[in-house]
Image: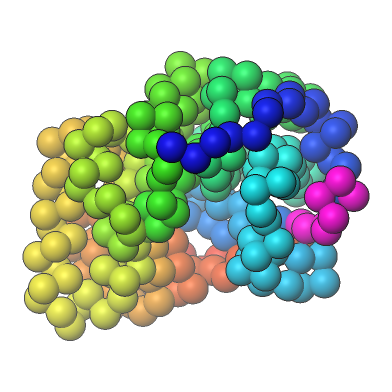
Amino acid sequence: MTKRPPFQSLGCAECRNHEALGFDFTMAFQPIFNVRTHAAFAYEALVRGVNGESAGYILGLVNDSNRYRFDQACRVKAIEEAARLGLLDIPDCLLSINFLPNAVYRPETCIRATLEAARLTHFPPERLMFEVTEGEKVVDPEHLKSIFVEYERQGFITAVDDFGAGYSGLNLLAMFQPQVLKIDMALTRGIDRDSVRQAIVEGIILVARRLNILVIAEGVETREESSTLLGMGIELMQGYLYARPEVGHLPAGCFDLG
């Protein structure tokens, strides 16, 4: 098991101090739409550099010494920016935040800065969704399970991102069941022309339904992909077909695609 650095609780004010990180960042937002009702289900906060640097560039600056501070700062930044841009004015719309499971030491304590930011911005906890990517190797699966249990106890929605393209797959799902699964774009891309991908996604949908888990399709880029996924029963979709991530704005997108 990887040794974790000493825990130090951060408040909102300290999480805004990006000088301690050694770099600055901001957030872009991309919507997740219900293509049947034409409503925004959520907006995902995606880290970006203040000068337009990619998420990959910013994440490349994260190391063992600043991982916890960066994770906490991302949560606070996402909540504050989403509130400033008016997400709370969109009925029932969620804010989706990615988190680094290997940066969370004691979930019941590490969540304090998040709760403080939510309180200060009047953001209801039940409108916050936390995503962990299956693409990040989880050092301690039991620890990740404890994080999800605590987050759900706090009223947050839990999600596994990039499902089907990471380290654990169904083994991760067997250990704990999040409320949401986001199917990776590697499975949705070109699904209208690929019977193998269709069979795999149908299997994921079946398992999710049996476990009462909501399914979102990521990386949707064409009408044909959207139509095929909708025909399979997936109503929640995210991708360039609808809207690209934008900094300083909640993109309305083009979700009425006929």
The single residue placed furthest to the bottom in the displayed view is 193
In-image side of 11 versus 257 (left or right): right
* In the image, residue 118 above or below residue 134: above
In-image side of 203 versus 87 (left or right): left
Please report the residue visible at 71 percent of the width from the left and 46 percent of the height from the top.
Answer: 65
Classify residue 50 by image quadrant: bottom right
* In the image, residue 237 above or below residue 197: above
Q: Position of residue 196 (x, y in %)?
A: 11, 73
Q: Which quadrant is home to the C terminus?
A: bottom left
Query: Is 20 a magenta residue?
Result: yes
Classify residue 163 by image quadrant: bottom left
The boundaries of the magenta stretch are 19-26
In-image side of 190 versus 237 (left or right): left
In-image side of 67 versus 33 (left or right): right
Please report the residue visible at 57 percent of the width from the left and 29 percent of the height from the top.
Answer: 105
Q: Position of residue 51 (x, y in %)?
A: 82, 72
Please report the residue visible at 41 percent of the width from the left and 45 percent of the height from the top.
Answer: 138
